[in-house]
Image: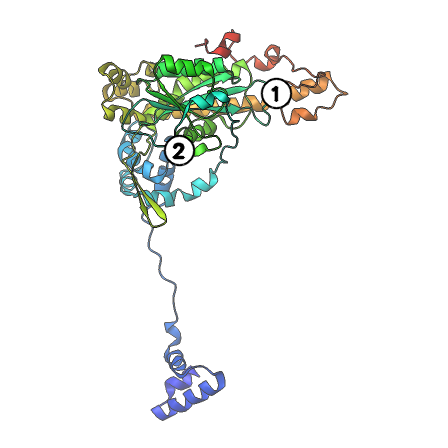
């Protein structure tokens, strides 16, 4: 039909063809004209795709930087890419060309998120589950505080307790006392065995000694480990403002709840830790590599303003900076504290390594170097991986020992509480510390390590 239409010599012939076509098909005349006028070679062709600006080599380098700095979002990663790409190349952490480096620095935050979409799907992790029971009658004396903090003042702390109990809360297990400073985002952690008031209070005092700023207030949830006479009197004696959140409202402690995931769960996971050897490893990690990596190399974003537009709230954030930079920018630290932050004595831990000797001298001249960040990250990942392997091996070891000693007794309870004491009166927890299983761990560990006296 189209060929006849194009070969028609007069308008009258074309009119007859159109009448015939419309009568047979029932299509509109104008549509039929457009359809018959179109040539076969003018069919729609797929649009030629533009050559990608950021190819696979750029994406691979971006993913490496994203991993080194513990998977931040695009807004937090952009200033890190601009500032740290050249230094990572100098220290041998990135092997890329000048062209790739220039493309990395030119990427916007939105492009970074798009390029890392696949990596984020692969590395997707489950969020933490759990909660605390309401506190005692003492909570009536402690004021409730919401999230209305004055972020311009340094020294207000939010604290929380993170359980490492695995699938069951029976028996004693390791808990992490996690604390963060509201204004700067500075974080400290201390592991304790169980959740007794005395050990939790001592852990908070240990954390306070490590903080480079003076405490002005302490905010916590309604758990009995915090809401007790011991901590209440301590805050009154030290003239600290002691407040608590509303029961059942975790968003009241939004600052520390965020850190519980990024600083504790992502490192230690959800396995059960309940031995002296494990608490020694966790304490060493919290006091050295992890706190240095999170406080000196992980940028945080501070909320500048909120504006309600109809049913939406528009939030504006400041330039992402590390907790160390926030503290130095606040000008609320003394000269001695600032000098200690610029040249922390704990960084000498890395000077004995031949790989990081040059980077340590560079850190002395310019604060803390990026190579130390990569070192802290690598050591943190190795420690957390070792802990997870120990917990899994210990789980199987406990099951094997119990089955061998009590072949005729049901051990199904062990599958839900693998290493906690079984309160049936028949089964006793085997003494794992005397087993050949621990021959690869440090010797000379005593019960004092459970209370924090082991250094």
**8 w.r.t. 351: above or below:** below
In the rendered view, does 96 fall on the left or right side of 169?
left
Location of the C terminus (image quadrant)? top left
What residue is drawn where x is 43% and y is 30%? 257
In the rendered view, does 51 fall on the left or right side of 124?
left
**Between residues 314 and 445, which one lies in front from this camera angle?**
314
Q: CA distance from mark 2 to mark 1?
A: 33 Å
In this view of the protein, can residue 381 be seen by the observer? yes
**Mark before the other along the chain sequence, 2 or 1:** 2
Local secondary structure at mark 2: helix
What residue is drawn where x is 44% and y is 28%? 260
Where does the image place residue 139, in percent across and percent down from the top left? 46, 23
In the rendered view, does 217 fall on the left or right side of 25?
left
In this view of the protein, can residue 445 be seen by the observer? no
Mark 1 Cα-neighbour bin, 10 Å: few <14, some 14–19, many ≥20: many
Where does the image place residue 73, in percent across and percent down from the top left? 37, 38
Q: Are marks 2 and 1 in contact (CB under 8 Å)?
A: no
What residue is drawn where x is 43% and y is 21%? 141
Mark 2 Cα-neighbour bin, 10 Å: few <14, some 14–19, many ≥20: some
Local secondary structure at mark 1: loop
**Between residues 230 and 443, which one lies in front from this camera angle?**
230
Where does the image place residue 65, in percent across and percent down from the top left? 35, 34
Which residue in the structure is indicated by mark 1?
419
Which residue in the structure is indicated by mark 2?
67
Q: Quadrant of residue 332?
A: top left
Q: How many marks?
A: 2
**Between residues 187 and 407, which one lies in front from this camera angle?**
187
Using the image, tell me which numbered label, if any, was put on residue 156: none
Seen as rendered, the residue at the extreme right is: 408
Seen as rendered, the residue at the extreme bottom is: 12
Where does the image place residue 327, in percent across and percent down from the top left? 27, 24
- The mark lying in front, picked from 2 and 1, is 1
């Amino acid at each position: 039909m189209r060929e006849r239409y194009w070969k028609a010599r007069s308008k009258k012939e074309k009119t007859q063809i159109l009448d015939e076509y419309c009568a047979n098909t029932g299509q509109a005349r104008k549509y039929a004209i457009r359809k018959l006028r179109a040539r076969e070679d003018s069919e729609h062709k797929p649009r030629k795709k533009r050559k990608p600006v950021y190819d696979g080599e750029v994406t691979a380098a971006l993913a490496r930087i994203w991993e080194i700095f513990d998977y931040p979002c695009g807004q937090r990663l952009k200033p890190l890419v601009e500032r740290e790409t050249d230094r990572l190349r100098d220290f041998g952490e990135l092997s890329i060309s000048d062209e790739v480096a220039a493309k990395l620095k030119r990427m916007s935050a939105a492009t970074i998120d798009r390029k890392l979409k696949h990596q984020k799907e692969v590395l997707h992790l489950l969020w933490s589950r759990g909660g605390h029971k309401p506190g005692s009658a003492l909570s009536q004396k402690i004021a409730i505080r919401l999230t209305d903090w004055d972020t311009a003042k340094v020294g207000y702390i939010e604290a929380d307790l993170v359980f490492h109990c695995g699938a069951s809360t029976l028996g004693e297990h390791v808990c992490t006392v996690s604390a963060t400073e509201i204004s700067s985002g500075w974080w400290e952690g201390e592991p304790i065995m169980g959740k007794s008031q005395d050990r939790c209070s001592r852990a908070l005092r240990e954390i306070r000694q490590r903080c480079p700023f003076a405490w002005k207030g302490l905010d916590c949830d309604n758990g009995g480990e915090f809401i007790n006479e011991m901590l209440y009197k301590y805050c009154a004696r030290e003239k600290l403002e002691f407040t608590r959140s509303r029961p059942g409202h975790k968003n009241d402690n939004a600052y520390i709840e965020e850190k519980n995931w990024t600083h504790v769960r992502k490192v230690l996971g959800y396995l059960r830790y309940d031995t002296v050897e494990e608490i020694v490893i966790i304490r060493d990690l919290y006091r050295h590599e992890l706190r240095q990596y999170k406080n000196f190399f992980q940028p945080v974003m501070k909320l500048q303003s909120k504006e309600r537009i109809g049913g939406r709230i528009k939030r504006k954030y400041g330039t992402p900076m590390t907790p160390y930079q926030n503290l130095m920018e606040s000008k609320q630290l003394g000269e001695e504290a600032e000098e200690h932050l610029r040249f922390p004595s704990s960084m000498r831990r890395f000077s004995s390594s031949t790989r990081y000797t040059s980077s340590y001298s560079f850190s002395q001249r310019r604060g803390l170097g990026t190579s130390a960040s990569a070192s802290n990250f690598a050591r943190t990942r190795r420690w957390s991986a070792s802990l997870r392997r120990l917990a899994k091996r210990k789980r199987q070891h406990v099951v094997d020992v119990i089955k061998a000693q009590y072949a005729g007794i049901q051990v199904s309870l062990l599958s839900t509480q693998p290493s906690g004491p079984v309160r049936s009166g028949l089964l006793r927890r085997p003494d794992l510390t005397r087993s050949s299983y621990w021959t690869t761990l440090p010797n000379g560990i005593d019960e004092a390590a459970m209370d924090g006296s082991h250094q």
